[in-house]
Image (cartoon, coloured by chain):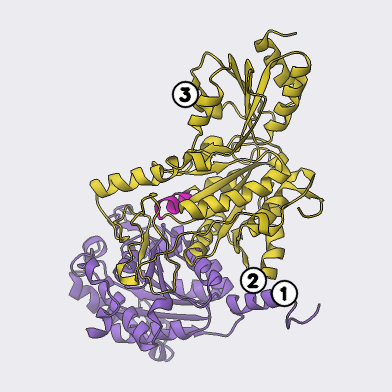
Amino acid sequence: MAVIEKYLRQSALPHIWCPGCGNGILLASILRAIDKVQLEQKKTVIVSGIGCSSRASGYMNFNTVHTAHGRALPFASGIKLANPELNVIVITGDGDSTAIGGNHFIHACRRNIDITTIIFNNSIYGMTGGQSSPLSPLGAMATTSPYGHVERPFDIAALAIAAGATYVARGTAYHAVALTDIVAKGIQNKGFSVIDAITQCPISYGRKNKMGGPAQMMQWQKDNAVLISAAAKMKPEELAGKFVIGQLHQSNAPEYITEYEKVLAKAQGRGGEAK
Amino acid sequence: MRPARLMQGNQACAEGMIAAGVRFFAGYPITPSTEVAEILAEELPKIGGKFIQMEDEIASMGAVLGASLTGVKAITATSGPGFSLKQELIGYGCMAEIPCVIVNVQRMGPSTGLPTSPAQGDVMQARWGTHGDHGIIVLSPGSVKETFEVAVACVNFAEKYRTPVILLLDEVIGHMRERVELPEARDIHIENRKVPACAPEEYQAFKPDADGVPPMAPFGEGYYYHVTGLVHTYGGMPAGPGPITDEIVHRLESKITRAQKDITLYTEDGIEGAEVLVITYGGSSRAAGAAVKEARKKGAKVGLLKLVTLWPFPCELILEKTKHAKTIIVPELNMGQLVGEIERYTGRDRVVSVTRVDGELFEPEEIVEPILAAGGKK
């Protein structure tokens, strides 16, 4: 407990999340990851969007920005480029990052800018009371999908990899210890890191989809998550309906801030190769 | 003064921004503002500044706000359609009190409109484009040289009052080339935002000083605080309805209106003893100036008040300068936007609105005619 208390704004607590919400578990994993990689507190900035997930920034004792809906990544990119000394961590939700912020998300991946983004993925718009999101499964019930969701969901990890992110992993609120580990690795990756963090929304998603209470929803996470090493040995039909967790992708690609340093060097006529 | 050069308004804008200390630009290509981005893409890296072309107009505004939070002077440039998209985060900048400048090189609207034609149709959008009550500073220059000076003033006001400032250019000023002599760096007055004098643990990021403006700590120096677009306490934490909300909404406007005298920039010519007063701003001021000269030759007693500051509306100045005028003529390249505001203070009886919305500039004769009609001279 002591580890995460150091990074919490005690005066801002208790949090606003509903009983049984998984967001607090994800927040604790992020704080443990920050501690694990020993990020300097005053050089670390937390940026979030709008939604249940994005309220996390307010509880964290850093320089924190609760931006507008979908806009965490543009703010974060401006912060990182203006002062590359800062470690920038983005907390966002599935609707925030892949619907209204979808364009920003793919372009942050493409730039491979050194930012770590943790997507609190609860498959629903929780704060507004349970509307379907781009991560709601086909057929899921939601207040705006009263006959079952007619759209297919994104696979965030596949989207991030295709768009150019250099570290992509998935975890869950149930696998909190493993989540700390992948967030820490994401922070250590010099480039754009995406962590798809699956969490439960018992109130706005679980009830409507008859998934039981918080404990049953976490049991669902446990039962349906397959570790990447195990998934490698499984047949596609065995994996149907399951999701893969762990580190899904890591690659080397030019990182934006490093590349921009070269632009500065060229413009200032120092060390840059003549062209 | 530096040696005279021939340059475009958009270039003077870019150079003014650099002179004022701007070291960050984020933007998206859009006519007729693109030269501002192109020039800064080349010039900023030479002096350690940063340029980024974002994926869209909204992202550009977000990046500018993020950069400013680190203590860097940051701007963007756009035109009508992009200005519309930026409104969401301009409101965020007002609420979270983040200094920045948004250059809007106006073109004919609505919508895609006439991308390369001059207009002054965004005067009201600049004031009220984002939702909710808020204060805003809007300056509009009428020449290339003035664009340089106004760019500096915009950055200074943004820093001094901790707020977004809008530089309302129009296509004709942005693209027009004029011979200009720019001042030496040492002769340019520069304002920098106030930083906290207290220890980090005592810092309240949104607690105003006596002037209504809170000091602003750059990120990364151990002054931990929360920035949000929600109504918030002095400490930056979300607040509910009640006195805190009332105070912040009032202060976001009053910190600017109380400084009206400092913020009001204008020039005047021959108002003393004039029976007719032409009130003008931006690109229209060129035709208005020529019209006043022409009308005087024909015997009209006419003065010229050229506003640079449009918002906060310079009501004190308008009341004073219109005191003796029998007729007030307001030419605008729109359907009559600022004229309504002038009428609020002078009454409607004395005011003549002259408008043009076909994508062309005023001919001086279009303004000479109402001056002569009002002045009783032929």
Q: Could you say where residue A177 lies in the image, as x and y percent from the top left?
A: 30, 86
Image quarter of the C terminus of chain A = bottom right
Res. A93 visible in picture = no
Tell me where residue B333 appears, x and y as whole percent. Answer: 65, 30
Q: Which chain is purple?
A: A
Badge 3 marks a residue whose secondary structure is helix
Q: In this view, does B230 lie above or below B66?
A: above
Mark number displayed over residue B48: 2
- Residue B90 lies in the magenta-colored region: yes
Q: What distance separates the C-alpha of mark 1 from that of mark 2?
A: 8 Å
Mark 1–mark 3 CB contact (< 8 Å): no
Please name the residue shown 44% across and 71% down the image. Answer: A155
Q: Are marks 1 and 2 in contact (CB under 8 Å)?
A: yes
The residue wearing badge 1 is A268
At label 3, the amino acid type is Arg
Q: Mark 1 lies on which chain?
A: A
Residue B344, label in figure: 3
Magenta extent: B88-96
Amino acid at dot 2: Gly
